[in-house]
Image (cartoon, rainbow, N blue to C red):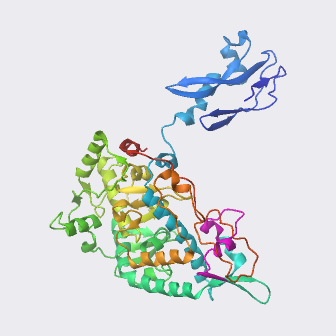
Amino acid sequence: MEAVRFSGSGVVRRTSLLSFDGLRLSLVPFRIPSSVGACGVGLGQRSFRGLTVKAATVVAPKFLIPAGNMLRESTGLSFHWFFMASQKRTMTKSRRVQDRSKKKRVHDLEIATERSKVTSKVLVVIEALKREPEQVIPLKRLEQYRQQINLSKPHKVVHFIRKSPKLFELYRDKKGVIWCGLTKEAEDLVEEETRLLEEHSEKAVEYVTRLLMMSVNKRLSVDKIAHFRRDFGLPYDFRNRWIHMFPDHFKVVRIEDAEYLQLVSWNPAWAVTELEKKAMATGTISDISSESEVLFLPFPMKFPSNYKKLFRYGGKIEHFQKRSHLSPYADAKGLSPGSQEFDKRAVAIMHEILSFTIEKRLVTDHLTHFRREFVMPQKLMRLLLKHFGIFYVSERGKRLSVFLTEAYEGSELADKCPLVLWKEKILRFTGYRGRRKRIESFNEFSDVEGPLFDGDFDNQTTFMNLEDDEIDGTIDDSSLADDSEMKAEQWMDAD
């Protein structure tokens, strides 16, 4: 990197870039009095608290070195200040969630995340078609769903449509306009989902009511609940019809031009956590009381096979598990944020919410929407990462997902409800086939043998000359970091 040269005229003729462990910093031009003379800025090595960084060094006349005050008064800058300011980002203790979690990936759950991403993209198109009166839509209008499908440019939605010929068909009308519609198989799947959602409705009512029971004011924004619609198995007409069908459980109220779902009656039988029910079923406890506000049950934990348990962190985990906690259905207004009781109740809340979902997983930003309503910590992600044996955070794709680890056997759910089996049918119809070989290490995760989708569409009738190239963004194939041995301190020190 070239040094920056200051001319005697007092104007820096060009800027330069400094690199501090991946941080690029531009030196902004500034004036130096001509009386100071010429000076230069180069790069050197500095060691600060054991960290070696590239730092600015000053090449200047000897009379300038003892005259630091004069330089500060003339330029308004101190090179000592410049060095420390440039290190601010490098020295900060907090790191991005993605940087922290690269060393903490669970291979099987990453595979589950990848499958879910494919299904979610296809369901975006299916739902768009269901909104249309005849369940057909002009192909150009589907481009407006690019963001929801998460397709990167220059790839088009039509390329993605052609990857699932068993689900989507293309038509040309008399005016030459290309339309997209559902195949007969897809129409049958849509009818099946409608029936399954109706059968699941009773359970969905219970889960929504229990969410209201856990909330501070016993009401939640309809907009926020809508984020959970597919995760909880709620029907498509959730807003317009479904929330008005159960007046004995909840009702819609309007507060400041916003709709809220308000709890109507408290059901003591539903004020029992899924953790208590499971403990009762396994014989861990012999009786359940809906009036008990303090629980002493440990949370089930599941660690990856390469997890190395250290004694000092194992002791922390054991201490956490033995500590009592307030029931998610008890009043938490008196808890102090940051206290051990506060944090453990937050873990109980997240455990309960994830237990309600059909796949025992959620997009994390859906959870963060409810921090205030459920009295959860502001830095919720920190808590999720810290309690990695209970939860697992996957950061594949643009949105992070959190899993309830106890619910999974490898990459599969241990107990699959009919709606989960229906989503697996959708995945089979897409032509997605995963990987041809078993992946033995994280480094091999990105070594794809052939496309992830079956690409032989030569026999399919189409009305456009389109390429069969794989679509970037359909599957995120960013490689996973090698993690030969996962240490406990990498998780317990999550900040």
- Find residue 415 and report its horizontal and vertical position in percent: 34, 71
Residue 13 visible at all: yes
Q: Where does the N terminus fall, quadrant-wise? A: top right
Residue at the image position 28 percent from the left and 57 percent from the top: 299
Q: Is residue 83 magenta?
A: no
Q: Considering depth in this image, is 17 or 166 the residue closer to the camera?
A: 166
- Find residue 144 and report its horizontal and vertical position in percent: 67, 71
| Furthest residue toward left | 286
User: Where 223 falls versus 394 (above or below)?
Assistant: below
- Find residue 472 and report its horizontal and vertical position in percent: 64, 62
The image quarter in which residue 275 lies: bottom left
User: Where 55 falls versus 282 (above or below)?
Assistant: above
Left or right of residue 24: residue 463 = right
- Find residue 191 and report its horizontal and vertical position in percent: 50, 87
Residue at the image position 64 percent from the left and 84 percent from the top: 181
Q: Where does the C terminus fall, quadrant-wise? A: top left
Range drawn in magenta: 145-169
Residue 246 visible at all: no
Q: Is residue 157 magenta?
A: yes
Residue at the image position 65 percent from the left and 76 percent from the top: 162
Left or right of residue 490: residue 3 = right
